[in-house]
């Protein structure tokens, strides 16, 4: 009798163990046939930057046209907050995650959490270093950096004294724009200084003030985004120097600064298009279609001419 009881209890425990290994209902693949039933989670690195506001708008506009629901969270440029935000979106039962990483390395844990419960992940503008990502929707940041360097060489000539304002350390966009820039600049420009200003306008101003004091012969500066470029312009104006500034993104303030002659150029992205393409990719994933691992959005160099 005792042997039968032990056998019975063993079977029960085995069944309970098997059940506990299954993901909760909300975490299982949705396989929803109706696109209007798809719920997207969008995690933005910061909404204190016009570029990412436009990116968010592109997501919301395309999702609305398809009848999809979108839950939006703002990481406020805080990697720890972004990880918590993504975990919250997972708990809320989103079907697909769209993530614009603050830090490409730090976000990896959140991507892996989504992988563990079979929620597809698409990254926007910046990649994730680890974890399975269905697609990266972004501009060719390396090519954009090369475009900036080539333009400076064409305007100022070879060996011109140049500085570089770098983005957030660890962000893939920072690495790629910097690498593209140096592919050309290391051969044809004299880059005397580079320093991070975290893609932030106020930090761009402060860092540029320090760079000018330490390197009074600077003739040009390449900023990894327009916000830093605009901050650099304020510092340059205060110094009375004549320094050429080229940014990256193509936001409205930068375009206005170019038209007024305060800024030389920007490598313009299309953030709304990136958002739209990400939603379209999410739709394809939901329908079981194969998508490209990298979905590019075209770049163009904007100058006053």
Image: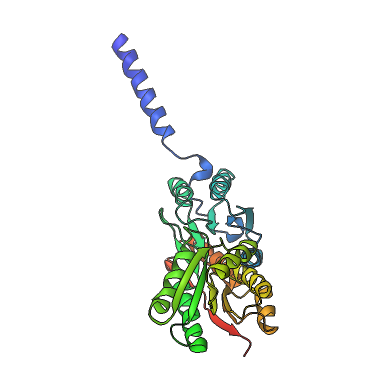
Question: In front here: 166 or 193?
Answer: 193
Q: Residue furthest bottom?
A: 305
Q: Residue furthest top?
A: 1
Q: Position of residue 234 (x, y in %)?
A: 67, 71
Q: Quadrant of the N terminus?
A: top left
Q: Quadrant of the C terminus?
A: bottom right
Question: In front here: 300 or 132?
Answer: 300
Q: Position of residue 17 (x, y in %)?
A: 39, 29
Residue at image coords 63%, 87%: 304
Residue 98 in view:
yes
Q: Which coloring applies here?
A: rainbow
Position of residue 53 relative to residue 242, above or below, is: above
Residue at image coords 57%, 59%: 34
Q: Position of residue 246 (x, y in %)?
A: 57, 77
Position of residue 98 relative to residue 109, above or below, is: below
Q: Is residue 149 left or right of residue 249?
A: left
């Amino acid at each position: 009798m005792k042997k039968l009881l032990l056998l019975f209890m063993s079977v029960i425990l085995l069944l309970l163990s098997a059940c506990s290994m299954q993901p909760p209902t909300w975490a299982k693949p949705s396989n929803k046939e109706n696109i209007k039933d798809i719920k997207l989670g969008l995690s933005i690195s910061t909404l204190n930057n016009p570029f990412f506001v436009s990116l968010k708008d592109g997501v919301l506009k395309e999702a609305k046209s398809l009848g999809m629901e979108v839950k939006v969270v703002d990481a406020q440029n805080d990697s720890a907050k972004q990880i918590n935000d993504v975990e919250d979106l997972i708990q809320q039962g989103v079907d697909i995650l769209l993530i614009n990483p603050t830090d490409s390395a730090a976000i990896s844990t959140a991507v892996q959490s989504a992988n563990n419960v079979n929620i597809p992940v698409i990254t926007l503008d910046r990649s994730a270093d680890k974890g399975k990502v269905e697609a990266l929707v972004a501009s060719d940041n390396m090519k954009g950096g090369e475009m900036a360097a080539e333009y400076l060489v064409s305007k100022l000539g070879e060996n011109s004294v140049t500085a570089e304002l770098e983005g957030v350390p660890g962000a893939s966009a920072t690495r790629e724009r910097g690498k593209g820039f140096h592919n050309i600049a290391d051969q044809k420009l004299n880059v005397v200084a580079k320093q991070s200003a975290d893609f932030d306008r106020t930090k761009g101003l402060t860092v540029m003030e320090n760079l000018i004091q330490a390197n009074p012969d600077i003739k040009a500066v390449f900023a990894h985004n327009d916000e830093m470029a605009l901050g650099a312009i304020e510092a340059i104006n205060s110094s009375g120097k004549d320094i050429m500034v080229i940014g990256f993104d193509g936001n409205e303030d930068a375009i206005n600064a170019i038209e007024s002659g305060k800024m030389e150029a920007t490598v313009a992205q299309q953030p709304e298009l990136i958002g739209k393409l990400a939603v379209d990719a999410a739709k394809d994933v939901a329908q079981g279609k194969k998508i490209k691992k990298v979905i590019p959005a075209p770049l163009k160099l904007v100058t006053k001419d």
